Each structure stands twice: as structure tokens, then as C-alpha cells.
Image: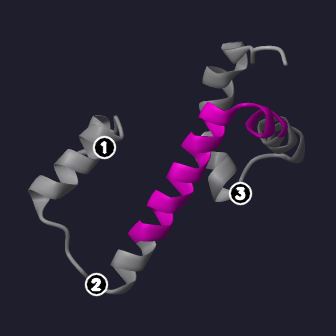
Amino acid sequence: MSEHDHSQCRSLLASLSDYVDGTLGDELCADIERHVSECRDCRVVVDTLRKTIYLYHETAAENASVPEVVRERLYRALNLEDYLA
């Protein structure tokens, strides 16, 4: 079994949000699906993002508020500091 070439990971993961949201074109979507089927690391990232979004929607549906300190820690853990208000 040959080792996976990770050179495509960064470029494909740049489109990950649109992929998970279902807003990508068919060709790029197919490229990501093919890559994720071969790359365990990227598959974990996609699965984690989907689960995070699901949990967010479940929490929002319950109208639960997240304490600011928890929100900040989550954003930092996900490298989303730019989105902190």
C-alpha cells in the first residue's frame, strides 16, 4: 500500500465549508469526495466539522445560550479567532 500524497489536502480543505454546506459545484464536490475517501486525515476533519455543525444546530434549536468564555475557547480550538466579535 502506498503512502498518501497530502499535497492536495490544503487546497481541498479550503473549500470544505462550502462542501459541507452543499454549495460547491459537482466537479469540485466529486474531487473532495474522492480525496476524502483516500485520505483518513481529511475524512476525520470532514466528519468532525459535520458533527460540530450538527451539535451547533441542536443547541441553537433548544435556544440554549453558550457562555462567552466557552464560545471563545471553541473558536480558538477550531482556529476561527477571526470570527470572534
Position of the N terminus, as image quadrant, is top right
Give the answer, above or below, for where 41 lies relative to 83: above
Tell me whether the residue at label 2 lies in contact with that at label 1, contact meaning CB atoms closer than 8 angstroms.
no
Q: Nearer the viewer, mark 2 or mark 1?
A: 2
The type of residue carrying mark 1 is Tyr
Distance of label 3 from label 1 (alpha carbons): 21 Å
Q: Point out residue 72 in the picture as x, y percentages from the top left corner.
A: 18, 48
Residue 65 painted magenta: no
Residue 48 painted magenta: yes
Give the answer, above or below, for where 35 lies relative to 70: above
Instruction: Identify the residue position indicated by label 1 in the image.
Output: 83
Tell me whether the residue at label 3 lies in contact with that at label 2, contact meaning CB atoms closer than 8 angstroms.
no
Which label belongs to residue 63?
2
56 relative to 4 in the view: left or right: left
Instruction: Spot the residue most to the bottom.
Output: 62
Range of residues picked out in magenta: 34-56
Given residues 67 and 37, the one toward you in this image is 37
The type of residue carrying mark 3 is Gly
Residue plotted at (68% across, 48% down): 19
Distance of label 2 from label 1 (alpha carbons): 21 Å
Instruction: Identify the residue position indicated by label 3 in the image.
Output: 22
12 relative to 69 in the view: left or right: right
Q: Point out residue 57 in the picture as x, y percentages from the top left corner.
A: 44, 73
36 relative to 53 in the view: left or right: right
First in sequence: mark 2 or mark 1? Answer: 2
